[in-house]
Amino acid sequence: MPDTLSTRLRAYAEVAGQLDVDAVALVPGPNFSRALGQSFMSMERPFLVVIPADKPPAAIVPNLELGSWRHVGFDGAVFDWKDQTGYDAAFAGLMDHLNIKSLAVEGQVMRVFVHHALKTAQPDLRIIDGEREISGLRMIKTPQDVAALRKAVDISERALHRTLDTVKLGQSEKQIEQMLIRMIFEEGADGLAFVPIVAAGDNSAQPHAHARHDYKVKAGDALLFDFGAQYDGFSADITRTVFLNHLSDEARDVYDTVLRANLAGLAVTRAGVTAHEIDDAVIGVLEASPYADRIRTKTGHGLGREVHEAPYIMRGNMMALPAGTVYTNEPGLYELGNFGVRIEDDVLVTEDGYETLTRFPKELMVIPC
């Protein structure tokens, strides 16, 4: 089936039918961008596309966005509004035009004031949270999606190689982070997937650490990089942990344990495997090691237009992963006050196994500096 605006919108109409509601509503964010093929900002202005199950879609568009909106090719009714007059009349017009009684929305994305504007326009409107089903359409990546992810990963890995060549003892974590960001953009990124994590020594034991201005890296430190480039709307998410000049026997053993856990997750990956089974394989390796008390996180999460999206790779999630799913395999062990190790790959699930989109070496790396 061709990837056109009408086919993408039809998929959301089918979701409305599955949820037994009259329509689905999308607001600016990853689902909006996926459906329309173009990104828009909402900021303080409500912006809304409503896709009914059995009639043409309609939209509320801020007047100042109409020029850009014309490039979308949307042929449904459009209700625009200006800052000077407010948006109440646009919501009233939309609801009168659609004549719907129930609506599924993105519970993690729609803001409260947009919800209230819908209810003000039609007080008896039944609104449900359809986040799981709406965002679930993004779980299976198209060939174009995978191509964008490959590019984001490639940019990220080239940036990391270049950054590691510049690391010197006595640099601050913040200096190294700034170099990584510079290299990400020099290699062709559209943006950052998220603010990079660059953490050395005891800071590497914080899974979501912030780079410090006042810590100077020293010989023997673990140096953890968790980062990703964004390209064409898709984000990479990669973690590698290296050591500076030398490492202890304990650090070597912890690294080997995390690597074995990462490989165990890959070994069970194939279309139809559950998120539970992957996490169980990964965490099982960590639990069987002498470092079980250092486990702080699940195995990973889905990756695409958002850095964290479905499926979440954790025990208890019995969702079977279809071919085309991309997830992160990122086991880690963290001892507060000491050091942490995380190894993260971006993994494409295929019918007969998997493909790791990340190619950066995972073997223990000691950087001479």
Image (tube, rainbow, N blue to C red):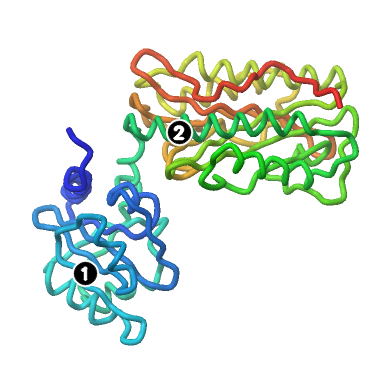
Say which quarter of the image contains residue 61. bottom left
Which circle, 1 or 2, is nearer the viewer? Answer: 2
**Relative image position of residue 109 (x, y in whole percent):** 41, 58
Residue 135 versus residue 288 in the image, above or below: below
Q: Is residue 326 visible?
A: yes
Task: Rate crowding at label 2 as few (under 14), some (14 to 19) or many (20 or more) other CA atoms within 10 Å.
Answer: many
Residue 131 versus residue 161 in the image, above or below: below
Farthest-out residue, bottom: 84
Image mark for residue 150: none
For mark 2, give the secondary structure.
helix
Image mark for residue 125: 1
**Relative image position of residue 149 (x, y in whole percent):** 45, 33
Left or right of 21 in this view: 128: right
**Relative image position of residue 309 (x, y in whole percent):** 44, 42
- Point out the image quarter for the C terminus: top right
What amino acid type is highlighted by mark number 2? Answer: Leu
Q: Identify the residue at horizontal 53%, vertical 23% (top origin).
A: 280
- Point out the image quarter for the N terminus: top left
**Relative image position of residue 306 (x, y in whole percent):** 46, 45
Q: Identify the residue at horizontal 27%, vertical 62% (top origin).
A: 69
Say which quarter of the image contains residue 24. bottom left
Left or right of 204 in this view: 17: left
What amino acid type is highlighted by mark number 1? Answer: Leu
Q: Earlier in the sequence, mark 1 or mark 2?
A: 1
Q: Nearer the viewer, residue 270 or 273?
A: 270
Task: Rate crowding at label 1 as few (under 14), some (14 to 19) or many (20 or more) other CA atoms within 10 Å.
Answer: some
Q: Identify the residue at horizontal 9%, vertical 57% (top origin).
A: 55
For mark 1, give the secondary structure.
loop
Left or right of 239 in this view: 54: left
**Residue at numbered disc 2:** 149
Q: Is residue 22 visible?
A: no
